[in-house]
Amino acid sequence: MAHWPNVRPSDRCGSGAAVMDGTGPGIVWCRSCAHWLQPNGEPVKPDYRQGLSADWWSESGYCTRLAPSPSTSEDQRTCWKVTHATDGCGDGDVA
């Protein structure tokens, strides 16, 4: 039996697509990607900064491109990937 992880009503997911801006596929910066989320316009506020500065966390958000996958564990903890506004990838989709 498969269980999907419990999620908050504000969580989301998407499937990215290579961006074409007339110059060919390229990097999409997280801050301009449709899959980057700062819930209620606020950066991520972790219990521990994991060695990163407060300035880094002030421009952080969640990459929601891929949803957490189902598992056989009913109590699987669900975490989205945290990225900085200036991070980017080739799979993003401009908002």
Image (cartoon, grey):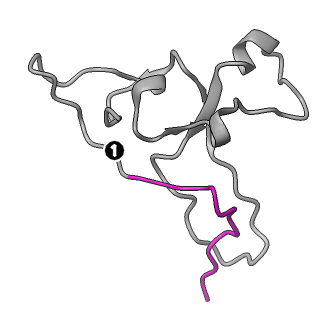
Q: Nearer the viewer, residue 57 or 77?
A: 57
Task: Tell me where residue 92 sits by quadrant.
Answer: top left
Q: Residue at x 25, y 21 (%)?
A: 26
**Label 1 is placed on what type of residue?**
Gly
Relative to 48, say whether 9 is above or below: below
Q: Mark 1 packing: few (<14 Cα in 10 Å), some, or many (20+)? A: some
Relative to 13, say whether 95 is above or below: above
Q: Which residue is mark 1?
A: 16
Relative to 41, say whether 7 is above or below: below
Magenta stretch, overall SS: loop
Instruction: Please state the horizontal and vertical placement of residue 12, each as a whole percent of the image.
Output: 53, 56
The secondary element bearing badge 1 is classed as: loop
Q: Is residue 13 magenta?
A: yes
Task: Tell me where residue 40 sits by quadrant.
Answer: top right
Residue furthest bottom in the image: 1
Instruction: Please state the horizontal and vertical placement of residue 73, each as a whole percent of the image.
Output: 73, 75
Q: Is residue 17 magenta?
A: no
Relative to 27, say whether 48 is above or below: below
Image quarter hosting the C terminus:
top left
Instruction: Please state the horizontal and vertical placement of residue 10, each as a whole percent of the image.
Output: 63, 56
Report the span colored magenta: 1-14
Q: Residue at x 32, y 28 (%)?
A: 90
Q: Residue at x 69, y 32 (%)?
A: 42
Image quarter hosting the N terminus:
bottom right
Q: Residue at x 78, y 15 (%)?
A: 52
Q: Nearer the viewer, residue 5 or 12?
A: 12
Q: Is residue 10 left or right of residue 48?
A: left
Instruction: Please state the horizontal and vertical placement of residue 14, each as a whole percent of the image.
Output: 41, 53
